[in-house]
Amino acid sequence: MKKSSSLNARFEESLKKNWDRPALSDYHGKTLTYGEVAEMIAKIHIFFDSCGIQKGDKIALCSKNQANWTVAYLAILTYGAVVVPLLHEFKPGAIHHLVNHSDAKLLFIGNVIWENLNAAEMPELEAIITLTEFDVAYARKPEYTEFRTKVNEIFKEHYPDFSPKDIDYHEDKPEDLALISYTSGSTGFSKGVMLPYRSMVYNIDFAYYAEPQMNNQSRVVSMLPTAHMFGMQFEFLYEFCIGAHIFFLTRLPSPKVILEAMKEIKPNLVVSVPLILEKIYKNMLVPFISKNYIKMFLSLPMIDQIILNTIRQRLIDAFGGQFEEVIVGGAPLNREVEAFLRRIKFPLTVGYGMTECGPIISYTHWNKCRLYACGKAAPKIDIKIDSPDPENVPGEILVKGDNVFLGYYKNPEATKAVMDHKWLRTGDMGVIDKDGYLFIRGRSKSMILGPSGQNIYPEEIESSINNLAYVGESLVVEGEDAGSLTALIYPDFDAIEHDGLPADTASLTKMFMNEMKVTNLELPTYCKVTEVQIFPEEFEKTPKRSIKRYLYHRR
């Protein structure tokens, strides 16, 4: 099937083709058909007209995952405005700042989030609309509220018998600005990543390439933040364009909630961040494979394969049993977890991307991927390593292609710092083997310089520490003494309590220091950890569940 180069034309086509089919569902809540979505979009467009919204105006959007979030998102793009999705985890002060920085004219907001905001802090807004019922919570002019109450009446006048023939959306061009994404950055407020329509369309076309078996009979569980590019592109936009049924987890997506939804919905594709798989591995698989008799069976030829096949099938069934593969991205996957899942031949693949690429950079189907690799360059994307020996010496990863962003909004200096003659400097370090497989070695920003100039990638050390008993999560940072390393550890307090171990800081520090002596034996001398610090609470994380490392770096 020939696909349009216009994103909005694809929305039109899907709405018309799948008019009576289910489109968006809040898990254990309401379901909207494609036709109902089209009607809601038309009514929102009427409201935009009443507020004097012009093509190219910015409209912010901030809430937890829900069907109405995606309706507002689609209404913004199809009108010809620019969508500014804000992560609902942002603090009120950050939301105020980003709404102002983006020059947004309207704000769609989750009801709970709105309770902590102040319209006076966002003086350029024409109106604020809550997402539960699309009510006007604030309006600069009284007539905006009046128009909202008259929308149904105006809609009936415009469309006496609303049908697919009434859909006619803004025609987007490849270089037009579609979206400004404020990601969790390493300093101050986040930079606004400007993504053109070509980047959005490229990522959807990539999904066609990666998941050709998906169609309008398919189902997907949206558990990643839809305001983040990974979840937005591969749990929402692609699925909407092919007419699939999307289920939104409106509750906190804990492993328990996720697996309950997977078992019930039986999705045809699973998109995940590493933390979810790591928790399932630690809580569901480790207790089983750690039993003495299972360890014995796993050491016996032939019998070990029977055990591994059983584990594999149980894990597949836990995710609903109808998917072709699980695609993981957003942060490094624990090496022990990945190695075990590869050993049991679980259909897992690890991709690589970033918001500035909307997000995909590299990927390989699970049956062709290599251990610890992030696949190969996505189709028509160029990747190169800034290193004299790209196969063996890590260098910064550079990317070029239709996926690359336009720049940072109102920040030409930051744009210039990452763009090098159409090549995007990712800030990530890696190598590429002779067959084109990309291996990430860490963030250049998190890289620590060793005492003799060695490059230390803390993620690799953390992977070993996280495999220790009673470790919940860890961070490796520079120590107080020059050339030393400190492990910041958040213990698994539930496991410690279950086993009746002392949970005071002194006892935990002593226990982990003894464990570190063993771990240090496996590390180069310049990578040895010399100090442990106990953290009583989880490290603060971004919405894609990677730790905000910059908050814990020592100066």
Image: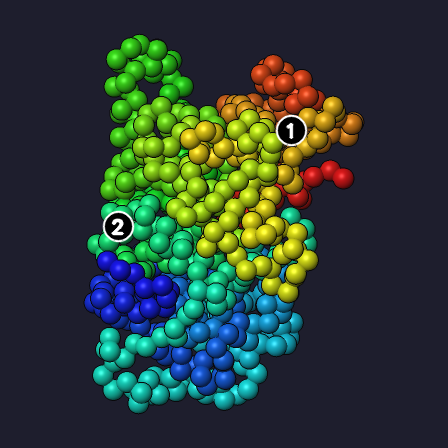
Query: Horizontally, is 14 left or right of 395 in the view?
Result: left
Q: Residue at x 52, y 75 (%)?
A: 57
Q: Return the residue at label 2.
A: 214
Query: From what the image shows, is residue 216 above or below residue 58?
Result: above
Q: Return the residue at label 1.
A: 456
The three-letter code of the residue at mark 1 reads Ile
Q: Residue at x 65, y 55 (%)?
A: 416
Query: Horizontally, is 391 left or right of 255 in the view?
Result: right
Query: Horizontally, is 217 left or right of 152 in the view?
Result: left
Q: Position of residue 2 (x, y in %)?
A: 26, 60
Label 1 with label 2: CB-CB less than 8 Å? no
Can residue 229 be seen at all in this image of the molecule? no
Q: Residue at x 55, y 67 (%)?
A: 115
Q: Secondary structure at mark 2?
A: loop
Q: Quadrant of residue 548?
A: top right
Can residue 159 be seen at all in this image of the molecule? yes
Q: Secondary structure at mark 1?
A: strand
Query: From what the image shows, is residue 437 above or below residue 102?
Result: above
The quarter of the picture where the C terminus appears is top right
Observer-nearest of 555 and 150: 555
The three-letter code of the residue at mark 2 reads Met
Q: Position of residue 499 (x, y in %)?
A: 50, 23
Q: Residue at x 21, y 54 (%)?
A: 217
Query: Horizontally, is 76 left or right of 414 in the view?
Result: left
Observer-nearest of 533 and 338: 338
> As drawn, which residue projects farthest toward the right?
481
Query: From what the image shows, is residue 507 above or below residue 41?
Result: above
Mark 1 / mark 2, whichever is N-terminal: 2
